[in-house]
Image (cartoon, rainbow, N blue to C red):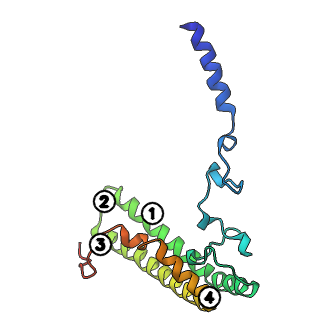
Amino acid sequence: MKTLLKPLLVALGIASLVPAPALAEPSPEGKIGSCGKMEPPEHRGHPEAGMMPGMPMPPFLHGIELTEAQRDAIFSILHADAPTVWERMKAVHKAHEALHALTMSGKYDEAKAKELAEAAADNMAVLSLLRSRSESRIYALLTPEQRKSVNEAKGKFGPHPANARFDIPRDASRKI
């Protein structure tokens, strides 16, 4: 038993020295995200489309060939909204953190929890409106042929994932 234990410990010690990113498999493009994991395409940006890396394109533009003028206009639209998006995301995060802290404090206050949940929801609503507005402005930049491609691609993927998760009638009450 002792003779097997020593080589096993040596092997484990050597294995622990190998850095984790060296064990990660690269993506088909040869890129590895932070933490050694592949990042989903929507988080890598679209450098092939001329956009800044890390700036996500709206999903409906995947596979659409854009002109330089369109890419510039899309960048301007997304860049203009970036400060508001950043501030609202920070507010959502802080509200969720505070709600979690309240939940685990042992001094749960229903009114305070409701206030925090509503703050998070209000900020998420603003983010949804910003995204909707900017995507509408981007869609308006597309040529009729590009719009046709977008609409054809939309039908290939079925219902929107947010709608597919729950089988809730549209007239369902939001009361809990």
Residue at image point 56% right, 81% down: 150
Query: For numbered disc 1, what is the local secondary structure?
Result: helix
Separation of disc 3 and disc 2 at Cα? 12 Å
**x and y percentages locating residue 35 in the rendered image:** 63, 50
Residue beneath label 1, please?
97
Front: mark 3 or 4? 4
Q: Looking at the picture, how far across and down is residue 39, in whole percent?
A: 61, 58
Check contact, mark 3 vs mark 2: CB within 8 A.
no
Horizontal side, residue 2 vs residue 100: left or right: right
Give the Cα distance between marks 4 and 1: 45 Å
Q: CA distance from mark 2 to mark 4?
A: 59 Å
Q: Which residue is mark 2?
A: 107
| Mark sitting earlier along the chain (2/1) | 1
The image shows residue 66 at horizontal and vertical percentages of 70, 82
Numbered disc in front, either 2 or 1: 1
Compare residues 76 and 27 and report the one nearer the observer: 27
Tag 3 residue: 111
